[in-house]
Amino acid sequence: MSGFVCCLNSDMPKISSVDYSFNSPGITTVEFTSLPNILKFVDCHSYFYTTKKKFAKDFGSNIHGSLQKEWGCPEQRFDQLSDWAMQIINGSTFVYIEGYSYGSHGKIFEIAENTAVLKYKLYKASIPIQVISPMSIKKNATSKGNSDKTAMIDVFCKTQIDIRKVLDCGDVSPMSDVVDSYFLLAAGISQLKTA
């Protein structure tokens, strides 16, 4: 709860959310003078760190893509990913991070190691975090805890902007990362309002 108090006592709090991954992590940030009733995407800034050159640019005034640097080993990659995230998160009074999906397959231990590096840097910077489960994020966005990426994007297009036209990449990264980090922030602010 101390993170919530910190947010509410700041003059112009900046809150960030991190949908963390290897290939296209997404971060959404918002600053506000009073807690918004409904989080609007046009009031936010969204960032993603892509491995695809064609997406490494700005899309309008609030969607920003950056190209990942080359890396020589997993540890260097984790360090670079977390440095990119910390640069954007800098100045935040609070950060929401998406929790692990326990049904995940593949490089589960590397995903955990990667996320741990970011969490450690947030800890060292004295930026409080709260982990929100993927099911809670989906339920807050679509009313169903088991919604897929297409359903999340559909709701985003109906309630925010037509991101399919803006990014034109199919229902995959980086579009899904922008949408997921936005809905993560919305879920966090929804909890903040009831705290």
Image (spheres, rainbow, N blue to C red):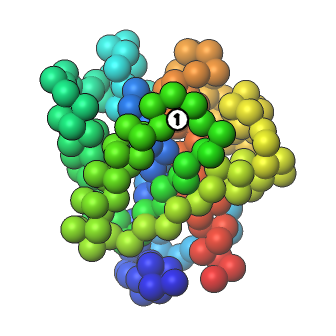
Name the residue tied to disc 1: 177
At 34% across and 65% down in the image, what residue appears?
Answer: 92
The front one of 44 and 180 is 180
Q: Residue at x 41, y 46 (%)?
A: 112
Q: How many marks?
A: 1
Looking at the picture, does residue 180 appear above or below residue 136? Answer: above
User: In the rendered view, would you say 2 is above or below 153?
Assistant: below
Q: Height in image: 169 above or below 78? A: above
Position of residue 4 measured from the top left corner of the image (x, y, whole percent): 50, 80
Crowd band around label 1 with a 10 angstrom C-alpha radius: few (<14), some (14–19), many (20+): many
- Quarter residue 146 falls in: top right
Where residue 184 appears, x then y in whole percent?
A: 58, 53
Does dot 1 land on a helix, a strand or a loop?
helix
Q: Is residue 72 left or right of residue 16?
A: left
Identify which residue is drawn at 27% across, 26% down.
68
* Side of 135 relative to 92 (left or right): right
- Asked whether 180 or 74 is in front, the reply is 74
Name the amino acid, label 1.
Asp
Q: Nearer the viewer, residue 21 or 64?
A: 21
Above or below 164: residue 129: below
Residue 190 place in picture, x, y as percent: 66, 67
Q: Is residue 26 visible?
A: no
Q: Quadrant of the C terminus?
A: bottom right
**Hey, which quadrant is residue 94 in on the image?**
bottom left
Whole-percent x, y for residue 62 in the image:
44, 40
Residue drawn at the location 37% of the way across and 15% of the way down: 52
